[in-house]
Image: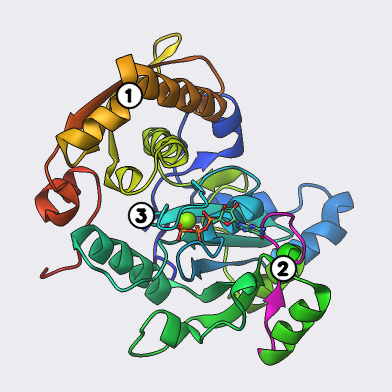
Amino acid sequence: MLPSATSDLPSAISHSAISHSAISHSAISYQRSATTDLPSAISDLPSAISHLVTRAGTVAVVGKPNAGKSTLLNRIVGQKLSITSPKPQSTRDRIVGIHTADGVQMIISDTPGLLNPQYALQHAMRASALAALGDADVVVYIADATQGPPPSLEIAASLARLPRGQLITALNKTDSISVSERDRLTTGIPGSFPISALTGDGVEMLLAEIARRLPESPFLYAEDDVGTQPLRFFASELIRETALEQLEQEVPYSVACEIEEFREDRTPVYIRAVMYVERETQKHILIGHKGSRIREIGSVARIKIEELVGGQVYLDLWVKVLPNWRRKPRAMRRFGYRLPEGS
Ligand SMILES: Nc1nc2c(ncn2[C@@H]2O[C@H](COP(=O)(O)OP(=O)(O)OP(=O)(O)O)[C@@H](O)[C@H]2O)c(=O)[nH]1
Ligand SMILES: [Mg+2]
C-alpha cells in the first residue's frame, strides 16, 4: 500500500546523485509532482494529456534465493542498486528502487530470497521479504526457469495466505534454456512472463503489465530518483558483495559490513568500514597471507564505490570478530537487520 502522505516516504537518491556527486534529495511533494506533469505551453498538450493520469504504486520482487531478483531490479532502474552474486542469499534486506517512465512510477522492492529460516539473520531476512510482499500493490514472483516448472508462490514461500497485491509470475533466466522449454514452461503457467533479467529480454513486456496493474496516483518521488537508501548503505553493500565474490564456503555468509565514517566533504571521499566475521579463523581467512586478501577486497570494493559516488574514494577497511552475530538479535540490529516483533 502507498503511504498516505509523502512525508511517510524516505528521502531518495537521484540518477544525478548516483552518477555525479553523493547528494541525497528529499522525497518530492505531492504538489510538486502534480505541477511537473502539467503542460507549460499549449504545444506540450498532446504528451501532457497522456500523463495527466499518472499511475504510481509499490511493487515487490519476491522468489527463492538466487532466482535473479536483484538482477531484475538493477535492470529495471538502469543502475546497480542491489548487489548480485551466483551465491544464494546475497540480498539480506529490502532494497528499494524507483522507476519512472511514460506517466508511471514504480516503487520496487527487491527482497531477500524466501527460505525456511534456520537462525536469527534468516528470520530477519524472511520477515523483510514478507513485509514487502504484504505492502505491495503488485507482487512479481520471479522463478528460475532453468530449474523446471516452479512451485506456486504460496508453496515456494510457505505462505499461509496469498498477498493482497496482484500477482505476476516471471520465469527468469530464459536465455539459458531452449525456446521449446521456455514455451512449455510459459504455457504451464497461464499469464506468466518469460524474461531474462541478464539480457533484458521480455522485461519491457513485464513492465507494461506491472504498469497496467498499478493504481492511478500522483508520483510520490521526483522523476529522476532511483533509490531511497543512503549512499553509505550502498557502500557497505558493495564491500559485502566483493567479499561474496572473493571468499568461499561459509565465510562470506558470516560477513557484515559497518561504515564507521563516511566523509563526503573530503577529497578523496573518506570511508572507514569494518567487516565483521563470527570467528577468529574467519578473520584470518579474510585478512589473508600478509594482508593480501583484505587488500584485494578493499581495492575492488573501492573501485565500485568510486563509480557509485562519482569521484575518488579512500577506503580504510578493517576486520573484526563479533562472535556468532548472525544468531544474536542485538548484534544484528547494529548492522540494521531487524527481527519481526516479538522474536
Ligand atoms: N543466465 C542468467 N543468469 C541470471 C539471470 N538473472 C540473474 N542471473 C544470475 O543469477 C545469479 C543470482 O542473481 P541475483 O540477482 O543475485 O539473484 P537473487 O534472486 O537476487 O538472489 P538472492 O538475493 O541471493 O536471493 C547471478 O549470478 C546472476 O548473474 C538471467 O536472466 N540469466
Ligand atoms: Mg538478491
| Discs 2, 1 touching: Cβ within 8 Å | no
- Report the disc number at residue 66: none
- For the point 51% across and 49% down, the residue is 85
- Report the disc number at residue 288: 1
If you read the primary sequence from the N terminus, does the residue marked by circle 2 or circle 1 appear first?
2
Q: 168 or 16, which is in the foreground?
A: 168
Q: Which secondary structure, mark 3? A: loop
Would residue 273 be counted in the magenta stretch?
Answer: no
Callout 3 crowding tier (Cα within 10 Å): few <14, some 14–19, many ≥20: many
**What amino acid is labelled 1 in the image?**
Gly
x, y (%) of residue 167? 55, 82
Callout 2 crowding tier (Cα within 10 Å): few <14, some 14–19, many ≥20: many
Would residue 200 be counted in the magenta stretch?
Answer: yes
Q: Is residue 259 above or below residue 208?
A: above
**What amino acid is labelled 2 in the image?**
Thr
- Report the disc number at residue 92: 3
Q: Ligand 1 within 8 A of label 2's CB?
A: yes
- Report the disc number at residue 174: 2
- For the point 32% across and 24% down, the residue is 288
Q: Residue furthest top?
A: 267
* Image-quadrant location for residue 156: bottom left
**What amino acid is labelled 3 in the image?**
Arg
- For the point 15% across and 56% down, the residue is 327
Which colour scheme appears in the figure?
rainbow
Which contiguous range is marked in magenta? 189-203
Q: Residue furthest right?
A: 43
